[in-house]
Image (cartoon, rainbow, N blue to C red):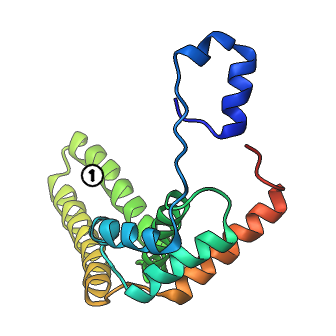
Amino acid sequence: MTATPTRYRQCLERYPSLENLIQPVAVRPATVAETVDVLRGVRNQYETHHRLVVTDEAVTAIAESADRQLPGVLPGKAVLLLDRSAARARIHLWGLAPDVVAVRELDDQIKHLNEEKEQVVADQDFPRAGELRDQGESLKNEVDRIRQEHRDRSQSQEMIVDARIVSEVVRELSAAMTMSGPATE
């Protein structure tokens, strides 16, 4: 069982027999320096998962910001901030995403052509069915080209988590906590 000292006392007041079964072990929260070490240890996994680079400057900023501005206990809240900062950097690439509306319109046109082609085949108008098939293939190639261009652009751009991204995420989390009220234990 893991609990804060307050929660531990509440449990013992409610269930006094637990006192003989549970021994309290006080664990101090990690320091900022220890948190930096933990973040350096998990950084590679987050870099691989989010396909980006986390700078040493960002690791230090994450540990310090989490300690000063976020509720919770280090290093847990710092790891959460690392993940959110990496996700923020990755979302930046979505701004470079292919025109979603254009791709959807092309997909709708392909679907419509396929439905029309099925009807034409049922009517045994095979030359028209061939034309519709060719039009559908042309649209599919266009969609593939748009998506490939996006992949090429996103792979050529190295995403980096730096102190600026960390400060943006901390600002947003702080604003969200302010609007929702203080965290309770």
166 vs 182, left or right, is left
Q: Which residue is mark 1?
A: 117
Pick whichever, 157 or 149, lies toward us: 157
Q: Which residue occupies 27% across, 51% down? A: 117
Q: In this view of the protein, can residue 46 be seen by the observer?
A: no
20 vs 6, left or right, is left
Pick whichever, 141 or 39, lies toward us: 39
Q: Which residue occupies 20% across, 65% down? A: 131
Determine which quarter of the picture holds residue 174: bottom right
Q: In this rendering, is residue 123 above or below 16? A: below
Instruction: Describe the element under mark 1 as helix, strand or loop.
Output: helix
Q: Position of residue 168 (x, y in %)?
A: 62, 81
Q: In this view of the protein, can residue 134 be seen by the observer?
A: yes
Q: In this rendering, is residue 112 above or below 89? A: above
Q: Position of residue 145 (x, y in %)?
A: 25, 79
Q: Position of residue 57 (x, y in %)?
A: 44, 89
Q: In this rendering, is residue 166 above or below 23? A: below
Q: Which residue occupies 51% across, 57% down? A: 76
